[in-house]
Structure formats: C-alpha cells, structure tokens
Image: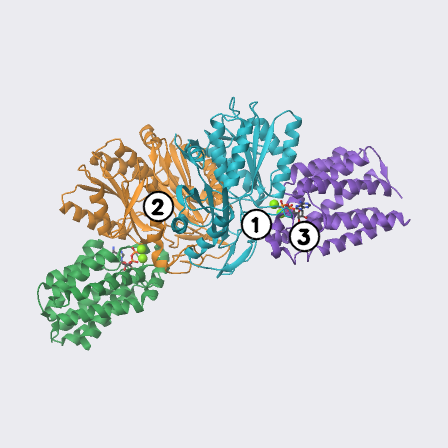
Chain colours: A orange, B cyan, C green, D purple
Amino acid sequence: MKKLINAPDDVVAEALAGMALAHADLIRVQPDPLVIVRADAPIANKVGIISGGGSGHEPMHGGFVGRGMLDAACPGHIFTSPVPDQMLAATRAVDAGRGVLQIVKNYTGDVMNFEMAAELAAAEGIEVATVITNDDVAVENSTWTAGRRGVGLTVLLEKIVGAAAEAGADLATLTALAQRVNAEGRSMGMALTSCTVPNVGRPGFDLPEGEIELGIGIHGEPGRYRVALAPAAEIAAMLVAPILEDLPFQRGDQVLAFVNGMGGTPLIELYLMYRELHKLLAARGIHIRRQLIGNYITSLDMAGCSFTLLRLDDHLTQLWDAPVLTPALRWGH
Amino acid sequence: MKKLINAPDDVVAEALAGMALAHADLIRVQPDPLVIVRADAPIANKVGIISGGGSGHEPMHGGFVGRGMLDAACPGHIFTSPVPDQMLAATRAVDAGRGVLQIVKNYTGDVMNFEMAAELAAAEGIEVATVITNDDVAVENSTWTAGRRGVGLTVLLEKIVGAAAEAGADLATLTALAQRVNAEGRSMGMALTSCTVPNVGRPGFDLPEGEIELGIGIHGEPGRYRVALAPAAEIAAMLVAPILEDLPFQRGDQVLAFVNGMGGTPLIELYLMYRELHKLLAARGIHIRRQLIGNYITSLDMAGCSFTLLRLDDHLTQLWDAPVLTPALRWGH
Amino acid sequence: MHITADRIIAFVERVATSIKAERDYLTQLDAAIGDADHGLNLDRGFSVVLTKLPTVADKDIGTILKAVGTTLVSTVGGASGPLYGTAFLRAGMVIGDRQTIGAINLIGAFEAALEGIQSRGKSGRGEKTMIDAIAPGIEAFKAAHFRGIDLLEALEEGLVACEAGMQATIPMLATKGRASYLGERSIGHQDPGATSAYLMAKALVETVRM
Amino acid sequence: MHITADRIIAFVERVATSIKAERDYLTQLDAAIGDADHGLNLDRGFSVVLTKLPTVADKDIGTILKAVGTTLVSTVGGASGPLYGTAFLRAGMVIGDRQTIGAINLIGAFEAALEGIQSRGKSGRGEKTMIDAIAPGIEAFKAAHFRGIDLLEALEEGLVACEAGMQATIPMLATKGRASYLGERSIGHQDPGATSAYLMAKALVETVRM
Ligand SMILES: Nc1ncnc2c1ncn2[C@@H]1O[C@H](COP(=O)(O)OP(=O)(O)O)[C@@H](O)[C@H]1O
Ligand SMILES: Nc1ncnc2c1ncn2[C@@H]1O[C@H](COP(=O)(O)OP(=O)(O)O)[C@@H](O)[C@H]1O
Ligand SMILES: [Mg+2]
Ligand SMILES: [Mg+2]
Ligand SMILES: [Mg+2]
Ligand SMILES: [Mg+2]
C-alpha cells in the first residue's frame, strides 16, 4: 500500500485537521464526537441540514458544509457509518429551533445509526426529519432486500435542499423537496480498479487487467457484474441504459448530468466520459441543462466513474444555480 | 492499461470536446489548430493572456480559461508541447490590440514552440511578451542546463496575472508582475506511482511497493532521487526543506500554500499533507495567508503530490482573491 | 449452576480478546461480500469496552451489559454497531440489577437481544446475517435446557447450533446488509456478522466452562 | 555523383518508414530519460509529411525540404519538432531551387541544419542530444569528401561516425532537454534524439546507395 499517510488509524482525524486549517472561514471541526460544522452555525431561523457517512468519499460530505449546502457533516471511520453520538452532536450544533433534516445514504449501517440519533434528538425535543437517498440502479429495489444504495444523487440533493434551506424553507417543505429530488434521480457506477482501505493495506478485490466491475457502490465493494474492459463509449452506454430505463427518463426531459470520478481517475477521462454521456442523451432527445464533472463522491483511490442523472424543472434548476460556498463547491457569490 | 478512453490517439480531442460541451458558457474549443478560447474573446481593451503545454495535466491549462484567468490555452498531445500554429491561432483569437502575454513552463519543447509562435505573431504585427515559469527546486538552476522546470507555480501565476489583466493592466506591467510571481514562488513534487501515457500503454517507470520518487516533474519522468516510502510527515518535510532554503523563505513571511495532487491521489490524502505542511511552516514562523488544495496540475493517473509556496504581499493577495470564473477555479462572482 | 457478574466481565474480556485475534479474518470475510471493515469495527468497539469495564466492575450484570451496549453503539459504527449495541442493551435491560443469573435469565436475555437485532435491522432468519448464527444457537440452548440438561452442556449445544448456523450462511443469498448489493455473487461466502456472533457465543461457553 | 529531387523524396519516405518501424524503440528510449513520446512525436509528424509529399513531388529540392520542415514544426511538437523542423527548413533554404545536388551542397545543407538546431536549442556538443550524433557525422562526411572520396562512400563514413556519436551519448550526463532534469541518473542511457538522427542518416545512405 502506497499512500500519503502517517498511521492508518489517524488518517481521518489528520485529514479533517487539514481541512479545518484550510477552510477556517467556512467550517470548524468539533472533536469527540467528530463533527464538521458550518463556521457560523447555528443560523438563526434556518432549518439545519446534516448528513454523514463513512469517510473515504472526500470531498463528500465535509467538503459540502458551508453556506447554501450542509450545516454539518458526520464523518465515520473509512467506509464505516458514523455513530449516533456524532449525529446527535451535529443536530445540537445546527438546530436553530426550526428543526433538522438528516440526509442519509441508504446503507443499513447509516440508516440505523442515524435512526438511533434521531430517537435521541427527539428525546431532547429537537424536531428531526430524515430523508434516505437510494439512487443506485445497480441494485434491485425490492422489499426483500436492503434496497438501493444512496450514491451520486446525494451530492446533488444536498446542494438543492441546502439552497432551499438557505432561502428559509421549513422542515416539512425541505423533506418533501428532498424526497422529490430522490425520486427524480438515478445513478450507476463502475470501477477500473479496486481501492485500498488504509487499515486493510491491500485492494478490496482483485480486478485483472482486462476486466472492470459494473454496478459498484462507493465502498470498494465488488460490483454487480464483472465484464471485459471496453472502450469508453461502450462503458458509457452500459451505465446510461439502466439509468434511463429505470426512472424512466423520456424524450424531452431536461437533466442535470453528473459525471463523478471515483478518486483515482483523472479529469481528462471524466471529460471524455462526459462527451460520451452527452452523445447518448442527445440521441434519446434528452437535454443536459446543467452538469457537474469531477471527483465529488469517491472511493479512496479507486479508478472509475459514475453517472447520475437528475430530471430538472425550473424550480430545481434555480436551486441548483443558487449561490453555494463550501470547500468543494462554490459559485454565485 | 485500464483507462476510460476509446482510442489512445483520440483522448485529447475527445476530452476537449467534452469540456467544450460542458462549459460552453465559459469557453469554446477551436479545432485545427486546437485552441481553447474564452467564450467572449477577444475582450476589448484587455491584454490577452495565453498559455499551453502538453495535455495530461488537466485541469491545467484549459480548465483555467475564463474570466479573470487565461484568454486561451493551447493543448499539445499528451505530455508533448503544442506546436507554434496553435499558439499563433490563440494569439490571433485573443489579441485586442493591447498585446498578448505568453505564460510558458520551462521545458525545452514548450520554450522553443512558443518562441517560434512569438516570432510568427510579431511578423503579423501583434505585440507578444513571454514569461517562463521555472519554480521546480528539484532541478538545479545552472546556466549549463535546460534550467528548472515550470510546475505548480504556473497555476498561481496564471490566476494572479489573469486578475491583473482583467483589471486593465498593460503588457509591460503584466510581464513584470508575472516575473515577480515567478521569482517569489518555489515548488517540489513527489510520486508514489508512475503514470501511464495512453499511447504507451504501460507506466513510464517502475516504482516498487516500498519506494517513492522525489523531485519529479509533471510528465511521468523519473524524479531526481528514489527514496524509501515514508510517513506523510517525513515526505512533507522532504518537500518543504528544499523549497524554503531555495528562495529562501523566512520567518514572518506570508505565503500562498498550494498542495497539488498528481491525479491519482485522493483528496483525503491531500488534506492530510496540508496539515503536515501547515505544521512545518508554523514551526518556522511562516504564515499561510491563502491556500489551494486539490488536483490542478496533474500527471494523468500518477499518485503523488507537490507543494508550491508563493510569498504574498497585499497586492498579490488581492489579485489572488479577485473573482475568477473558469471550469476549474471559480470564486468571487 | 449460576453465572456471576465477574464471570460476565470475564466473558466480555474474552470476547474482546477473541475479536482482536480474529480481526483480520473477520475483515477478510467482509472484503469478499461487504466493505472490509467488520473486524476493524468490532475491534475498535471492544477495545474501548475494555477501557470502560473497570468503571462497572463492581456493578450488577444489567449495568455491565448496558455499558457494553452503549459503548458499542458509540464506537463501532457501521451496521454491526447499532445491532450488537442494541443486543447488549436489551439483554442488560432484561437482566436488570441481578448479581447472578441462571439459564432462564440467559434465555430471556438472549431472546431480548435477538429481538433487538431483528427490530433494529428489520431482518429475520435466512437473510445471511448474524441472525442466522444467533437464532439457531438460542433455540438449541433453550431446547437443551428444557430437556433438563445442565447449563454448560446446554450452552455447548447452543454453540454447536450457532456454528452450524454460521456455516449455513455460506450458500445463502444475502437479502440484508451490504452483501445484498451483490445479489447472486453473495452466494458462497460466509457472513462476517454470523462469524463474529459465533465468536461471542464461543467466548461465553469458554468463560462458563472455566 | 549527384542526388536528384526524386531521390530526396525517396529519402524522406524512407525516413518516415524507418521512424514508424522504430517508433516504440524511440519512445522506450525516451521513457528512460524523458517523457516517453519521442517516437510518437516523430511518427505523427512524418505520417503527415507523407501525405504532403505529393504536393511537392515535382518541385525543386529546396521546396521539398522546406515543406518537410514546416510540416514537422506544425505537427511534431515537443523539443524535436522545432529542432528537426528548423533543420529541414534551413537545409531547404540553403539548397534553394536546385533539382540536383552534390556533396558540396550536401555539406552546406548539413551545416545549415546543424546550426539551426544549435541556435534554436541553445545547445552544443556533449550535452547528450541529437547534436552528438549529427555533428560528428557531418564532420566525418566532410573530411571524407575532402579526402576525395566518392559521395556514397563519404556518406557511409559519415554514418559510421554518426552511429558512434549516438552510442557515445550513453555515458554522457545530459545538460539539455528533459533528460537534464535527471542529473546523474541520465547517465547510462542512449539519447532518443541522437537515435532518431542516426535513423535519418541511415535512411539517407540507403537511399543514395539504391
Ligand atoms: N439488517 C441486518 N440485520 C441483521 N444483521 C445485519 C443486518 N445488516 C447487516 N448485518 C450484519 O452486519 C454485518 C456487517 O457488519 P459491519 O461490516 O461491521 O457493518 P457494515 O456492513 O456497515 O460495514 C453483516 O455481516 C451482517 O451479519
Ligand atoms: N536543446 C536541445 N538541443 C538539441 N537537441 C535537443 C535539445 N533538447 C532536446 N533535444 C533532443 O530532443 C530529444 C527529445 O525529443 P522529444 O522527446 O520529441 O521532445 P520532448 O523532450 O519535448 O518530449 C532529445 O532526446 C534530444 O536529443
Ligand atoms: Mg462499513
Ligand atoms: Mg514530450
Ligand atoms: Mg462492513
Ligand atoms: Mg520526449
């Protein structure tokens, strides 16, 4: 394992210390329980928006804390859900009396830990609502399974809901908005290589030179299918097809297209994939109204990418365009 | 080789097509000769700022074209200097009568190709000035060599000079400013792994599990020294020491600290390295006034990082803070 | 035969030791069908539990188990944190302020723990989780007890069933937890949670046997 | 013995063929001490040159060589593009509108080309570049010619010196081009540019020999 780290156990704490030093104008990092909080939290008269999950997905979620997006993020150990103490501390830190919305990616661990935190917060008299993202079309959605994973859409949802919260929306409105965004978006990812968890020291799975994993999540877990390495155009088609079918997206739809890198794939390849995505959507009469391209929800050093499509209307587009000022996303100020 | 590409020969053109589709509001891509031009170029009454170099360093330089930074960028083939035709086309596209400044990284090929372009532009009556960046302390600066390479400082210089150009400075002033920035900054980089040029298909050099290259450039070339893999704190010290000595930076200096990823290293490690850098500078009484952390001048999928320090005064700080609106850097609008 | 509070402390210590010893094995099992952290998660939690045990060393069994549960909830994270945390909490609540417990109390505690896991995890048997080791273990223990067998022997019968349950997860298709994302590819691998549950059961039997 | 314009065309075609055949070898040499693109760069350039040749097939030698030079400048990039481009341009300028050339013209063309490379590259002998193959080659050719030897034989003597010059780059410490960044680590590797220069010289000799 070759990484720019000291001891594997200290990676998360040291990286967060670096973040805190770098972005003291935007965020502060509270230790024990570990929480990344917007520097000026709580914001009077604003619903608090919190999220969290295992670390190793940087910049998500800590990089999205700031004006117009999250009020706090709870970073777990690498690929491990945070514990309820963290979400409770985050909730307390951001609550301004109008309640707190938890944005939770659908993983058993995340869901249960946030659920326990919500019970504890409720016992303290803080109004908490929860929205679970489950946009990953690689996983069949059945009442007999843990359901679909929350992946790329989470980034877009946090931006959009964060903008609405900044504009003063109440908890019920924000919850409904988040549910709507979740309903209107779908994702699918692939890996060229596995990733290496520092504490494990070797890649999570072996992926021979000529093979790729299709339908991966964001935790270095193997995907749904292993297929032969193919040209970018074919890989793009394999990612897009199940996304379009699932919602389904239709001719005339306007979308936000998000090409996300898994951490080890350089930008030049992501732009190349964006071109493929654009071609495939154009051929189906789907119009890309907004786009996001880059490493935003990653799996450590995994090489690969994911596509997320979110159907846009004017309202969602305005919320997407609204100013945001966080370590990882900033525009409009 | 596992990459999200179609044919190796088409990588640059296809990625640029993706960029053009994604950022049509900011840039346009002119084919044959290939040039990325600010969408609204030429800007009346503004000195044109152009740069360029081999591709494979994304987002540099194309990602820095836009308001407050570059007017045009000339992308060569991967790791290969662009040809004079491109710089000439860029110069023509951005010249608004007040001349054009070429920002050139010090590589023999880049220098010669820009030089030929400048001769051709001069023959057409366009006033052209050239500034060469050579901030890499890994290479000894001697009149007997090709001199130091231009690396990370180029990003900061393009931002600062771009801001001054946007504010209306003339060509002589901008040239002097660029020379000053170049004089006040130093960089040093390291690699955990080599990178793979698509047309070559295998890593440029072998780097065994327990070894790293110190003093690398940005073209997948081996570094100056090969040393044993070490904890982040030690690697940071190895990068900082030669930078500080060389300028030299002194107690009380204020700096812009730039932790750059080489393309395959995830953000979590870059923030961790930023913490190490911060500690080392604090111990020397050097104050980080501004920072930039992320993948900005990369070597395809190489894992590793570089540090750049630029001594700041109020004037440079203001220019750094000035609004910028490009695909890769945006703030203040 | 009765189990005293200091036996319970010894049991928890033995679990911590066993989890640490099998940390990499558990993580390896999780790498195959999960995210390669199960051993790390539990070891992190039980290491903190060890530092907390002295504060409850002279307390009743319910207090000890609840302290373990809260500590696991606060330190493990992932799916196994809330699940094992809830299990120990519920067991502690059922046992209350007793200083010694017998087979009947154990059955009550086990069943409360299992129910806690099932309601927190919204899961049942046959989904390739820790439940598939725990539930048959409890059933066998209970059956043996009601056949009139001695506590240790009954626990040993429970352990055999628990181990069989753990092994029976290998051919199962996962429908809960991360492994469920793999669909058919989850088949052929032993569930890490079922394995850690078996390690805990083994630690209990060994403690009682001593 | 004289060289006609169509022999020059044949020479350029032979260079293109040879560069394509040795593309990976040149790139491999460049990987060791540069950035692994020298073969790719030249092959890209000479492939375009081949498509341009028909437009100058019936022209004088100067026009042919200048067309090669401009095309190389516009397509090769890197360090070798301006250097070889300038070399062909300068050679073409010296030769002008001749339809046939002899040894004396060749010497003039070679020297103009070398001077073009040196002034564009701000470089001289002993810096581990293409110059270390080209300069001794020209010297040997010139010396042989002034000893009164026939053109082909003189060129062959030049080629031998050129090859020796290429090999002499192996122990050199690079002080120009990318290899110079490696410092001491540049020692022990043959310079890619010296190698491509040798391939061009070889192509010339083979064309004249035919
Ligand atoms: N819904 C559930 N009900 C019961 N057990 C579960 C459930 N989900 C997961 N598990 C158990 O948790 C184990 C994984 O724990 P761990 O790796 O620590 O958490 P995570 O899956 O969040 O990484 C699985 O092997 C399984 O036995
Ligand atoms: N200043 C110079 N003068 C003469 N030849 C040079 C000079 N710099 C580089 N070269 C030659 O160019 C070759 C490298 O060419 P190439 O790989 O195509 O360009 P780059 O170095 O830009 O990648 C070197 O092997 C060397 O022979
Ligand atoms: Mg986990
Ligand atoms: Mg090159
Ligand atoms: Mg796990
Ligand atoms: Mg080269």
> Depth-wise, is mark 3 or mark 1 nearer the camera?
1
Q: Tell me which amino acid carries mark 2.
A: Leu
Q: Are dots 2 and 1 on a single chain?
A: no
* SS of the residue under disc 2: helix
According to the picture, the residue beneath numbered tag 2 turns out to be: A21
Q: Tell me which amino acid carries mark 1.
A: Val
Q: CA distance from mark 3 to mark 2?
A: 46 Å
* SS of the residue under disc 1: loop
Q: From the viewer's perspective, is residue B208 above or below residue B332?
A: below
Q: Looking at the image, which is closer to me, A209 or B99?
A: B99
Residue A59 lies left or right of residue D8; in this view the side is left
Within 8 Å of ligand 2, the CB of disc 3? yes
Quadrant of image for the N terminus of chain C: bottom left
Q: From the viewer's perspective, is residue C174 above or below residue A129?
A: below
Q: Quadrant of ligand 4?
A: top right
- Residue at 73% in and 40% down: D116
Q: Tell me which amino acid carries mark 3.
A: Asp
Q: Residues within 10 Å of mark 2 (few under 14, many from 20)?
A: some
Q: Looking at the image, which is closer to me, B173 or A291?
A: B173
- Are the two marked residues, 3 and 1, in contact with CB atoms closer than 8 angstroms? no
Q: Is residue D168 visible?
A: yes
Residue C203 lies left or right of residue C25; in this view the side is left
The tag on residue D137 is none
Q: Is residue B66 visible?
A: no
- Marked residue chain, label 3: D
Q: CA distance from mark 2 to mark 1?
A: 31 Å
According to the picture, the residue beneath numbered tag 3 turns out to be: D191
Within 8 Å of ligand 3, the CB of disc 2? no
Q: Residues within 10 Å of mark 3 (few under 14, many from 20)?
A: many
- Residue at 53% in and 29% down: B173
According to the picture, the residue beneath numbered tag 1 turns out to be: B139
Percent from the top left, x then y, of residue A188? Answer: 39, 45
